[in-house]
Image: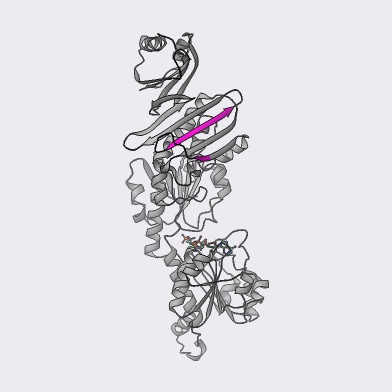
């Protein structure tokens, strides 16, 4: 049973797939309320309110996945999660439209003094001339951070007859052209814009990105908006620039400290604000809840997630291509690890075949995690597998080969240890499943089952029969048996599978067969 803590207000209607799963228990409590059961929690679902710190992770030793029902992950300590092998996922586009619409509503409200006029009217006043506004048409809008939300704002601004200039260091010329916006460096954008709106994530680079020095380069009378994250616009500097009259007004949905009770910016008449409402629509909340519920379910079903922050992101199309090989590579890694109980120096993986024509990095991570699972105490998965390999001084390499030896796909692994080397190749055959087709240079063909025994021996009459007899004498039922050899009378291998795990004692009995040169019990 997986225990999932829903620590913030996430729309229950969107969590249907999780609440319906028989192996999942949803616990709707804050971190404080769940203090006594944190050590049993497998997943945590949050919005921006709960801070998922390293300290909290230390109190949650079973935690496997953190799901952010929204975009910004600045409330989650990603490096700490990565180190512990905890997957972090978010809902990258579920609230894009809502936030873009909110920003636009804030912009119109700011320019037309709607909140101030409304408050005045409610107060029994009728001050028409005090609230003369400014049109949006023909104004230049500067968008800093031109991702999903920035892009949606640009589309709306164009319809309002605004000129749109943008700054985003990662923006391609192609996307700028497609979106009909002018891309400029920040120092060129700031003096040109009548209104500036920021839509970057909060990172070390963007914290204080728009500060006093930058605001002084803007037009006198500029309007600024922050519906992204508190701190991208430096709050103290903004306050000073508004008080001095250089900035005409600001619209803020987010603050460094939330709630910003008693904040000096809120005392200014030309600052309008909302309590972090960008994503607060019925639609966005349903979208983000559905997205993270699906991701968490996918994760607990043992499949690769598609919107992970600390794993390479994969699209639905790539996900479908990756999925058949995902378990195969983990099993190959695990077989190699259990056959090589010694210090390892190098692991190299080769991918061949047309059906592997995608970024195979996720498969290599899955393979390495399979390799380490039986070796390290720490929880190991695709998130921290490469880190664990690096910490242990193991070189991991990945290559593509044109030669798939007639298979539609072929994944080959070579592990170099202190004393010996091991090679293993596997393929995935549609409607047939995973097959191991080569082990240590021996052609073989077996399905990686749960309980396996690998035997290397001299090819002599009677050896196979002897192994069968010893197992039979001890009432061990062989489910399948595959044999392979390079040449008659040379070295040969057997791979046997069983319905139940084989006891270590059996290994002792089998060792008495002098032709056996190597043996490994494998459990997958
Ligand atoms: N107010 C709200 O309720 C609300 C809702 C959703 C998102 N957000 C915030 O809005 C941010 C943007 O969301 P999005 O969905 O558009 O994300 P996104 O990832 O699609 O876009 C962010 C853009 O910022 C750019 N960027 C990164 N560093 C930059 C820098 N130093 N200078 C300029 N640009 C930089 C990136 O290249 C990217 O294009 C989120 O990170 C989140 O913090 C707030
Ligand atoms: O980053 C986001 O998705 C927004 O800031 C929304 O935050 P919320 O889920 O706390 O409303």
In the rendered image of this protein, does residue 89 appear above or below residue 348?
below
Q: Dividing the picture into quarters, in which one does residue 354 lie? A: top left
Whole-percent x, y for residue 383 in the image? 52, 43
Which quadrant of the figure contains the C terminus?
top left
Say whether residue 104 is magenta. Answer: no
Residue at image position (51%, 29%) is 374
Q: Is residue 30 visible?
A: no
Q: Is residue 289 visible?
A: yes
Whole-percent x, y for residue 438 in the image? 45, 27
Residue at image position (40%, 51%) is 316
Task: Count the labels in the image.
Answer: 0
Q: Is residue 524 left or right of residue 52?
A: left
Residue nearest the observer in this picture, 249 or 308: 308
In the rendered image of this protein, does residue 137 appear above or below residue 438?
below
Q: Going by the picture, which residue comes out furthest to the bottom?
A: 129
In the rendered image of this protein, does residue 403 appear above or below residue 306?
above
Residue nearest the observer in this picture, 517 or 261: 517
Whole-percent x, y for residue 148 in the image? 47, 64
The residue range painted magenta reads 399-418
């Amino acid at each position: 049973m997986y225990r999932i803590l829903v620590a913030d207000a996430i729309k229950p209607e969107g969590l249907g797939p999780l609440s319906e799963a028989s192996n999942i228990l949803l616990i709707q409590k804050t971190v404080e309320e769940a203090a006594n059961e944190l050590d049993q929690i497998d997943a945590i679902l949050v919005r921006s309110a709960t801070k998922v710190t390293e300290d909290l992770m230390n109190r949650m030793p079973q935690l496997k996945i953190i799901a952010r029902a929204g975009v910004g992950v600045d409330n989650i300590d990603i490096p700490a999660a990565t180190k512990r092998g905890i997957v972090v996922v978010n809902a990258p586009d579920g609230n894009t439209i809502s936030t873009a619409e909110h920003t636009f509503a804030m912009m119109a409200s700011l320019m037309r003094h709607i909140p101030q006029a409304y408050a005045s009217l409610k107060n029994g006043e009728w001050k028409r001339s005090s609230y003369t506004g400014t049109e949006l048409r023909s104004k230049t809008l500067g968008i800093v951070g031109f991702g999903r939300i920035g892009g949606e704002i640009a589309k709306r601004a164009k319809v309002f007859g605004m000129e749109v200039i943008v700054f985003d260091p990662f923006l391609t010329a192609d996307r700028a052209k497609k979106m009909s916006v002018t891309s400029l460096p920040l120092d060129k954008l700031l003096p040109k814009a009548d209104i500036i709106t920021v839509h970057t994530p909060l990172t070390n680079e963007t914290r204080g990105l728009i500060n006093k020095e930058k605001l002084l380069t803007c037009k006198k009378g500029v309007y600024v908006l922050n519906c992204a994250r508190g701190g991208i616009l430096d709050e103290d500097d903004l306050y000073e620039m508004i008080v001095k009259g250089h900035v005409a007004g600001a619209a803020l949905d987010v603050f460094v400290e939330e709630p910003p009770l008693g904040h000096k910016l809120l005392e200014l008449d030309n600052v309008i604000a909302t309590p972090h409402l960008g994503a607060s629509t019925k639609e966005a909340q349903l979208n983000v809840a559905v997205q993270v519920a699906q991701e968490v379910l996918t994760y607990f079903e043992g499949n690769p997630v598609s919107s992970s922050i600390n794993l390479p992101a994969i699209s639905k199309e790539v996900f479908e291509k990756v999925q058949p090989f995902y378990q195969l590579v983990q099993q190959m890694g695990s077989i190699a690890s259990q056959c090589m109980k010694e210090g390892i120096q190098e692991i190299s993986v080769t991918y061949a075949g047309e059906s592997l024509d995608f970024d195979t990095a996720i498969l290599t991570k899955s393979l390495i995690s399979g390799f380490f699972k039986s070796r390290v105490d720490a929880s190991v998965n695709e998130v921290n597998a490469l880190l664990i390999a690096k910490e242990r001084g193991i070189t991991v390499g990945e290559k593509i080969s044109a030669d798939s030896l007639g298979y539609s796909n072929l994944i080959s692994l070579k592990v170099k240890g202190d004393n010996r080397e091991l090679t293993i190749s596997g393929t995935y055959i549609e409607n047939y499943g995973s097959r191991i087709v080569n082990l240590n240079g021996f052609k073989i063909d077996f399905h990686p089952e749960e309980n396996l025994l690998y035997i290397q021996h001299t090819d002599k009459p009677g050896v196979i029969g002897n192994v069968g007899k010893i197992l039979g004498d001890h009432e061990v039922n062989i489910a399948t048996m595959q044999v392979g050899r390079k040449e008659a009378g040379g070295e040969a291998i057997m791979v046997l599978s069983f319905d139940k795990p084989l006891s270590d004692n059996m290994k002792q009995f089998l060792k008495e067969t002098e032709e056996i040169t190597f043996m490994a019990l494998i459990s997958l």
